[in-house]
Amino acid sequence: MISNPKVVITDYDYGDLEIEKGILHGVGAEVIPLQAKCEEDLFEVAEDCFGMINQYARVGRETIQRMKQCKVIARYGVGVDIVDVDAATERGILVTNVQDYCTEEVADHSIALWLTLARKLPRYDKATRSGVWNWQTGAPVFRIRGRVMGIVSFGKIGQAIAERARGFGVELMVYDPYISQSSIEKMGCRPVNKETLIRESDFLMMQAPMTEETHHFLSFNEFKLMKSNAIVINTGR
């Protein structure tokens, strides 16, 4: 390992980098913090960095081709779509991610959004602020227990949502062509095809990432299939 290796942090949300600095300084590394707004902001620092950590900044081929000694690009998060993995692989640079990044938080947020809409809280809030106080404002409000929740994409977040939703007594259905039926059934859920999920769900929870395959997963035909009072929660990206 070279002396005083430079580690570039391309951008970050938190107010400080004390945790990162504490770890990296401990192994003799120099931390170069940035708030890159475009890929061009990385060109100069890429040339002599030993490692790069990125949150939202794109690390594309143009940046990677400038790297002369970089060994690793570490992503703050699960997805690595903003890193040109092929270009990094060609140069022998490892690309890493955080596989459980915000799994619990996204699952909690999905449940919060679901309950907010299922219990018609936005309508009641608006009515109350207008001086109206009666339950009919949000009607119809259906009991959650016994209704059907459909989950699209059953990775870590989808499974965490299922664990939380089960306590509310909903029937759980799952559509994920990449997960075996037995794995879905072990989680107490019913594996179904896309059409069945869309047609029977009272609540549709989507966590699928945006890809060519999932683009327009819901379109005119799918919305026609849905129940008229179905609720869609999309926490994918």
Image (cartoon, rainbow, N blue to C red):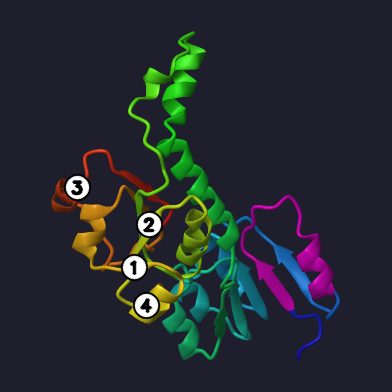
How crowded pointer 4 is (Cα within 10 Å; few <14, some 14-19, many 20+) is rated as: some
- Picture disc at residue 179: 4
The quarter of the displayed image where residue 96 is located: bottom right
- Picture disc at residue 223: 3
Q: Is residue 237 above or below residue 101?
A: above
- Mark nearer the viewer, 4 or 2: 2
State the CA–CA distance, disc 1 to disc 2.
Answer: 8 Å
Q: Is residue 2 above or below residue 194?
A: below
Q: Is residue 190 left or right of residue 129?
A: left
Kind of residue at disc 4? Ile
Q: Earlier in the sequence, mark 2 or mark 3?
A: 2
The quarter in which the N terminus is drawn is bottom right
- The residue to which callout 1 is attached is 190
Give residue 178's position: percent from left, percent from top.
34, 78
- Picture disc at residue 171: 2
Kind of residue at disc 3? Phe
